[in-house]
């Protein structure tokens, strides 16, 4: 059985949600952020030196990194569910967006907190903001007329995208991207999403992201 080391208000919600969608049994070990710094506790560092969330244990090994964990779970327990059939155009979409969200999109979003310390007219800040807008718009455009990020089917890429949307919402930027906002609202209505929150606690990123912004301005 998979053990999920679940950090409060964190990305590990996507692993709980994925396992709930698959109906796969799992065990949760809860870890709480430091109330002042919001950093991971030493209890999580004792499991893996990166002290990252999500972290899972399975087959006698420990694994970090959300995209890798998602792919591992799908390959090991998915039985073809929550991903398109191999060697299809939809499979290409799936792999593109699953990796794009964590690679090309999340970085520019988190970078905004550091850039916020610069004056609005600073060229570095302007370049960072332009890059972020282009990346977020690309995702928003991909959802135009679609309910899911892969055409015609709910996949694990939607699960990964939802957490990104929650970060975007927590940073106060999601209103500029109506398709991402609509997708987030729909995903929160899924029963498996709600079961994951009931077991792991609410995602609750607005307060967390506000703290990140304050520390960045520090």
Image (spheres, rainbow, N blue to C red):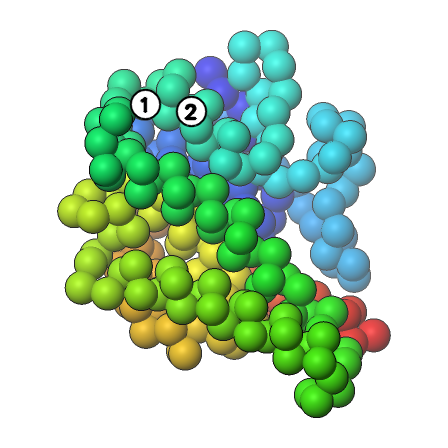
Quadrant of residue 214 in the image? bottom right
What residue is drawn where x is 78% and y is 30%?
49
Residue 161 visible: yes
Crowd tier of the residue under label 2, counting other residues whose Cα lies within 10 Å: few below 14, some 14–19, many 20 or above: some
Q: Which numbered disc covers residue 78? A: 1
Quadrant in which the C terminus appears:
bottom right
What residue is drawn where x is 73% and y is 37%?
51
What residue is drawn where x is 72% and y is 75%?
124
For residue 117, above or below residue 170: below
Report x, y in % for residue 58: 54, 16
Crowd tier of the residue under label 1, counting other residues whose Cα lies within 10 Å: few below 14, some 14–19, many 20 or above: some
Q: Which residue is mark 2?
A: 73
Report x, y in % for residue 216: 76, 70
Left or right of residue 95, residue 5 in this image = right
Report x, y in % for residue 112: 64, 70
Residue furthest to the right in view is: 218
Mark 2 secondary-structure assignment:
helix
Residues marked 1 and 2 touching at CB (< 8 Å): yes
For residue 15, above or below residue 197: above
The total of numbered circles placed on residues is: 2
Left or right of residue 127, residue 143 in this image = left
Residue 159 visible: no
Between 33 and 99, the one lying in front of the other is 99
Left or right of residue 123, residue 109 in this image = left
Mark 1 secondary-structure assignment:
loop
């Amino acid at each position: 059985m998979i053990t999920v080391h679940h950090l409060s208000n964190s990305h590990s919600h996507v692993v709980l949600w994925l396992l709930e969608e698959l109906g796969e049994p799992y065990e949760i070990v809860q870890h709480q952020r430091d109330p002042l710094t919001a950093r991971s506790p030493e209890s999580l560092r004792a499991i893996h030196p990166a002290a990252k969330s999500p972290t899972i244990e399975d087959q006698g090994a420990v694994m970090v990194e959300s995209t890798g964990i998602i792919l591992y779970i799908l390959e090991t327990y998915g039985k073809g569910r929550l991903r398109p059939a191999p060697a299809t155009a939809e499979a290409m979409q799936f792999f593109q967006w699953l990796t794009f969200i964590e690679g090309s999109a999340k970085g520019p979003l988190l970078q905004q907190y550091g850039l916020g310390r610069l004056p609005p007219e600073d060229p570095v800040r302007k370049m960072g903001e332009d890059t972020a807008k282009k990346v977020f718009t690309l995702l928003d455009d991909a959802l135009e007329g679609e309910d899911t990020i892969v055409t015609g089917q709910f996949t694990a890429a939607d699960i990964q995208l939802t957490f990104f949307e929650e970060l975007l919402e927590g940073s106060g930027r999601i209103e500029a991207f109506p398709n991402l906002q609509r997708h987030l609202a729909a995903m929160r209505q899924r029963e498996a999403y709600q079961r994951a929150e009931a077991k792991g606690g609410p995602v609750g990123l607005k307060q967390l992201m506000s703290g990140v912004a304050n520390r960045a301005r520090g």
